[in-house]
Image (cartoon, rainbow, N blue to C red):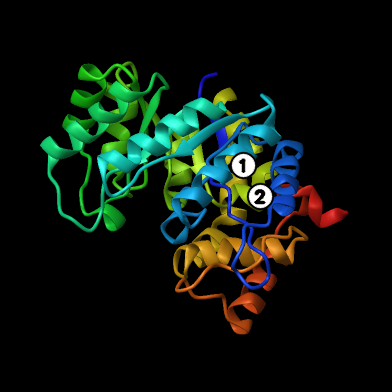
Amino acid sequence: MTLKGVLSAIVTPFTPDGEQIDEAALRALVEQGIEDGVDGFVPAGGTGEFSVLSQAERMRLIEVVVDQTAGRASVLAHTGATSTREAVKLSKHAEEVGATALMLATPYYEPIGFDEAWSYYAGVADATSLPICAYNFPPATGLHLDVDFLVKLAREIPQVKYVKDSSSNIMQMNTLLADHANDITFLNGEDVLMLPALMLKAPGMVMGVANFMSPGLAKLQHASETGDDQTIVDIWREINPLIRFLASNRYSSGVKAACELLGLTVGPVRAPIPQFTAAQKEQLKVILNQLDPSLLTKAANK
């Protein structure tokens, strides 16, 4: 199964106290995402709060999402970790339970360079047979995976077929799409670059807002594929205030708040990630109410 289209960086629903994963809510969120038109899910990613999950919780998330999708959508399991050893363990588990592909952020906290990053991806590739998506998010990892490194990675480690780029580097996006589409498939991971990515016909996106806005994103992706630039511009202008608001606040907290406002049970974010305040939720509610309901999850109309 090829990774393309709208991939939901699915949130991790918690019980009201934040102590346990709410598996029933997770399964319901997967079902709603499929009904809303997503092409795939990315469990245990940044929007899924992987940094505050235990290893066992990360594994369980992937198991539940794979089971619930039942082949109806792709599952790009995030298995990046602070050590190659742990990344290999998580990746082997994801393969065993039926994930479509692996997404790996490079190790964070302990500074590493390109040589160490290459070895990290090579180590996971040696231990598994799944396609690999490099995850480039330098604000969180401290290492920017530039064009030269990504092309080298894909050419020397054939399993590396994709990059989720959340670097906000528009020149890098242009170069990868225009000059290296045959080397590595670009998946846009930066909400604020959605417009240029769609205009340049990026084959896919990984978005946290897909949790509650998949119908709109699916329209955007279809418009990109058919060359309907006017539709892209029209929808982008409408959703831009929302995108800017979420980007200027705690993203995961905002996505969960939007889900709850629109009828999706996802629970709180887990400490120490801050919850949206009452004032922030009220601002968010005003912005959501200004959007065409057809762009938002069908759960809002149930």
Query: Which labelled disc corresponds to residue 257?
Result: none
Other-residue count near label 1 (Cα within 10 Å), few / some / many at <14 / 14–19 / ≥20: many
**Residue at figure coordinates x 42%, y 48% from the top left:** 190
Q: Is 115 located above or below residue 122 in the figure?
A: below
The N terminus, quarter of image: top right
Instruction: Give whichever of 131, 174 is nearer the camera.
Output: 131
In terms of image quadrants, where is residue 109?
Answer: bottom left
Q: Is 266 located above or below residue 173 in the figure?
A: below
* Left or right of 231, for residue 91: left
In terms of image quadrants, where is residue 241?
Answer: bottom right
**Residue at figure coordinates x 33%, y 16% from the top left:** 182
Whole-percent x, y for residue 240 in the image: 54, 57
Kind of residue at badge 2: Met
The C terminus, quarter of image: bottom right
Q: Is 261 located above or below residue 34 in the figure?
A: below
Instruction: State whether residue 273 appears in this view.
Output: yes
Number of numbered labels in the structure image: 2
Kind of residue at badge 1: Leu
* Left or right of 122, for residue 288: right
Whole-percent x, y for residue 287 in the image: 65, 68
Residue receiving disc 2 = 213
Instruction: Give whichever of 36, 131 is nearer the camera.
Output: 131
**Whether label 1 touches label 2, CB < 8 Å:** yes
Query: Which labelled disc corresponds to residue 217?
Result: 1
Instruction: State whether residue 203 appears in this view.
Output: no
